[in-house]
Image (spheres, grey):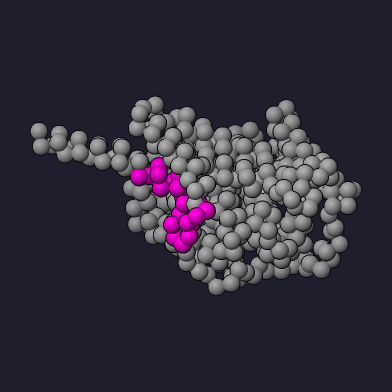
Amino acid sequence: MNKNNKQLLNHSLAGIQHVFVANVWLDPIYVAAAAGLSLNLSTNLVNTIFIVSGLVTLTQVTKLVKLPIIQGPSAAFDALMINAGKVGQLASASGSILISALIVLLLSVTGLINHLIKLLTPAITGTIIFLVGISLAGFTLSEFLGGYPGDQGFSSPQNLMLSFTTTIIVILLSIFGKGVGKRFAFLIALVVGDALAVLLGVTDYSVLADKAWFGVPHLLPYGALKFNGVIFLTFLIAYLVAVVESLGVYQAVEATLKEKISPKRIQNGLIGESVGSMISSAFGGFPTTAFAQNVGILNLTGNSSRIPIMIAAGLFIFMGFIPKMGAFLALTPDPVIGGIFLPAAATLIMTGFNILKKVPENSANTMIIGLSIILAIALPNYATGWSGLTGELLSNSILIGALSAIVLQVTLVNLPRIMKDIRGHHD
């Protein structure tokens, strides 16, 4: 094998590795299962995410930010999409994503996004990400246990065998595994879980025969886009948090490459993510953001070439046009999904916790973080008696936490600082 062919093979293998480590498939199948979507809608969601992730990744790596970064669905939107699906508001969710992405696009083009991001301190972003993880815990545990008390199959030996098996595989490989086992922990758990489900007669893949080998995701699969003020506000806040996450990934790659990235390239990256998210919303998907886990591969392998990322993007697009692939992933039993996502949700909680650990310890930050988490967890318990807009606001723990953190940040930190500067200027 000559040098060029060997290099191409190495890039191809690295690209395939990026595909599996990115877990682009994990969020859509989890959201589809937890939200109770039909097989057709679940298939559409999975295929849309694959195509959009591939297109945005390819555009970013070749034209816009020009960094070896994989783009995929942000876990910050999982709980919001599941909530919307459970109450029949996915059309409003899609409309909210479209408007939020448009706002971020305009802010990015004008450069105003930099001023807004300064408001989202680590105390706020850490609190929101932590609460997203906590919110996902309830959905994840219901998948893990096979529903809720009273549901058929709840905590049955069969379901628990599937969920515990997949969770144990993910945990053991993530902690004690090395090389391929550690990097592909989630994929290995999925394969074993699906195989066990077939042996137990839980999953019937015969329905895949009705799915075409080639197809295009449906436009507006949830119906005409709608607007709901509360849903829009939650998605806008989550979107801004996702922007902060992306900036963190850009900085991590900057450190890995030992290359200074110009503000213009970062601006282009945010523009690319916004446009991709707008396209995704039109086909029933949710926003894309830069994936941090793939930066770890750059560090582990030392291969920082953009070619593997381009290959990975091509594979995402290819898989997105295969409905059988989307349907196969969508047929993954709920306990297997719960088993896989339970460790993933724990990781998300720890991501928020790690951000909070970096927040300077002072009375203001203690109140911002502590009160926001308390209100977010406790207030929804009192929302059952409220209806209309108030009921919607009080029942959304992520929105309560985000708004509380922002209001407390402005009240306890920003305004006193401004007043101090004014007094200092007059003195």
Q: Nearer the viewer, residue 359 or 101?
A: 359
Q: Position of residue 86 (x, y in %)?
A: 61, 59
Residue visible at 56% across and 37% down in the picture = 349
**In-front residue for pair 114/250:** 114
Give the image location of residue 331, x and y in percent.
Answer: 77, 56
Q: Position of residue 73 (x, y in %)?
A: 59, 52
Does residue 14 show up magenta in the picture? no
Identity of the residue furthest to the bottom in this view: 224
Q: Quadrant of residue 282?
A: bottom right
Residue appearing at x 54%, y 44% in the figure: 132
The quarter of the picture where the C terminus appears is top left
State whether the magenta stretch is mostly helix, strand or loop: helix
* Residue drawn where x is 75% and y is 60% of the image: 327
- Residue 176 position, x and y percent, is 73, 27
342 to the left or right of 416: right
Does any portion of residue 354 appear in the rendered image?
yes
Picture quadrant of residue 325: bottom right
Q: Is residue 321 visible in this depiction of the protein? A: no
Residue 396 lies within the magenta run: yes
Q: Along the line of sight, which residue is nearer the eye, 339 or 19?
A: 339
Answer with left or right where residue 154 lies relative to residue 306: right
Query: What residue range appears in magenta?
Result: 384-407
| Image side of residue 186 versus residue 54, left or right | right
Q: Is residue 379 above or below residue 313?
A: above
